[in-house]
């Protein structure tokens, strides 16, 4: 997986840094977590989307509240695991 991808935001292509990609337990949804390295109050803003692939074309779709809760759980697990290394 590349560390950077280009995402169209308001008609402009922006470089995004991919933090992680993963599928849910049922393997029915694939998520991407990324950042444009935007800082607010010494924190970096993080974005998450559904990652869709069809015929070698990729798109991002909005997530709902349930998806966001699941993504936050996965991010917490990754942070805990990396802190234990």
Image: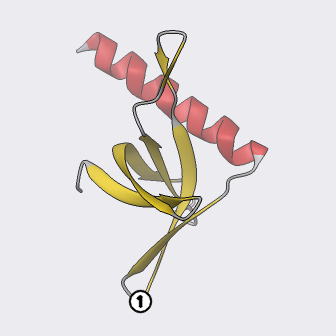
Quick check: 84 left or right of 76?
A: left
Question: In the image, what residue occupies the spot 33% across and 56% down?
Answer: 5
Q: Residues within 10 Å of mark 1 (few under 14, many from 20)?
A: few
Residue 77 x %, y %: 46, 26
In the image as oriented, which residue stretches furthest toward the right? 65
Place residue 72 in its image quadrant. Answer: top right
Residue 7 x %, y %: 44, 59
Quick check: 62 left or right of 77?
A: right
Number of numbered callouts drawn: 1
Residue 50, relative to residue 48: is it above or below? below
Residue 35 x %, y %: 43, 38
Which quadrant is the C terminus positioned in? top left
In the image as oriented, which residue stretches furthest toward the bottom? 55
Q: How is the image coloured?
A: secondary structure
Residue 62, relative to residue 79: is it above or below? below
Question: In the image, what residue occupies the spot 40% across and 21% down?
Answer: 79
Residue 30, relative to residue 16: is it above or below? below
Quick check: 55 left or right of 1?
A: right
Place residue 80 in its image quadrant. Answer: top left
Which quadrant is the N terminus positioned in? bottom left
Q: Considering the numbered disc 1 on the image, is that residue within a helix, a strand or a loop?
A: loop
Q: Which residue is mark 1?
A: 55
Question: In the image, what residue occupies the spot 51% across and 33% down?
Answer: 46
């Amino acid at each position: 997986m590349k560390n950077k991808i280009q995402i169209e935001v308001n008609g402009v292509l922006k470089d995004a840094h991919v933090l992680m990609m993963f599928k849910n337990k049922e393997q029915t949804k694939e998520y991407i977590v990324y950042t444009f390295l935007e800082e607010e109050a010494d924190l970096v803003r993080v974005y998450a989307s559904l990652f869709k692939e069809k015929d070698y074309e990729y798109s991002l779709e909005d997530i709902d509240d349930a998806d966001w809760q699941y993504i936050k759980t996965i991010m917490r697990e990754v942070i805990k695991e990396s802190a234990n290394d």
